Image: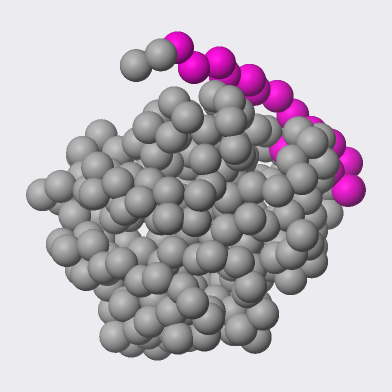
Amino acid sequence: MREVVKETGYIESYDGTKIYFESRGEGPTIVMAYGIGCLMNHWRHQAKYFSQNYRTVLFDYRGHHMSERPALLENLNVHAIAKDLKALCDHLKIEKASFWGHSFGAQVLLRTYDNNPELFENLVFINGFATNPLKGMYGLDLDPIFRNVKKGYETLPETISTLWKLSVDNPITNRLMGLAGGFNLSLTSFKDIQVYTKGVASIDFDVFTYIFESMINYNATAVLEEVKVPTLIIGGAKDSVTPLSFQREFHQKIKGSKLQIIPYGSHCSQLDMPDLVNLRIEKFLSEIAYR
């Protein structure tokens, strides 16, 4: 395995918010967008593998980890993140790229595609969704629960913020996340689950809430039918967070798209079975001569 050149830095987005990014390798560009509350670690297997022959670019969403939270909370939404992504592409002089989105990252890419389709050479979606994922999560409608939690925060912000950090960063939560379909405990490294829960705990509750509300209010279903680039859709057979019905909708609406179901895959199929996911994406890129 050859040595890969890594670049890190910040770009200043449209409203002055500084966005952190990492770029690895050389060659055709791949830009990866993770899920809400997630980390670059969710793409670690893919970044390591594809950086051997491609330039891989990852970035932290505003209010997440190394990136700044904006001065105005109302600038915490999918539309702002799409502008951040465009600013990042401009900074790195990316004219066209392969864009990959996991979970909420699919919405980010669909919003970006709606604004700037000229940037997209192809698309890869992993366990993504175009509209409110709470309607269908675990076979239920969990939207009212979020609304009630948000009301609780508005009434008792300090109490809810403390409970938030305590509830997401403990060993019990790590196990529950796996059992709930977020990860496959038999396949994903437990360390990856711990990294995720600690990452979520590090995000301010108000930041998470604003972006989460934007996520459930944004509907990119119409954009799916406008996608005109080669697209691979990957779904986890055991994903209870975004069930396969979401992936089948993508496949149905995106003309000419390809659908791959990962057996035993959870909501984080790229961490559960990285070799299988990597090989399937590599095959897709080879078929469309993106190399």
Side (left or right) of 11 relative to 256: right
Residue 183 painted magenta = no
Q: Residue at x 22, y 70 (%)?
A: 237
Q: Residue at x 54, y 24 (%)?
A: 25
Q: Residue furthest toward the right?
A: 15
Q: Position of residue 44 (x, y in %)?
A: 39, 35
Side (left or right) of 63 relative to 45: right
- Magenta segment: 3-19
Q: Position of residue 17 (x, y in %)?
A: 81, 41
Kindly indicate the quadrant of the structure image that contains residue 108.
bottom right
Kindly indicate the quadrant of the structure image that contains residue 203.
top right
Image quarter of the N terminus:
top left
In this view of the protein, which residue sits in the foreground, 131 or 274? 274
Kindly indicate the quadrant of the structure image that contains residue 157.
bottom right
Q: Against 33, is 263 above or below?
A: below
Q: Can the viewer see residue 35 in this picture?
A: no
Side (left or right) of 256 relative to 197: right
User: What colour scheme governs how the chains and residues are painted in the rendered image of this protein?
Assistant: one colour
Q: Against 172, is 148 above or below?
A: below
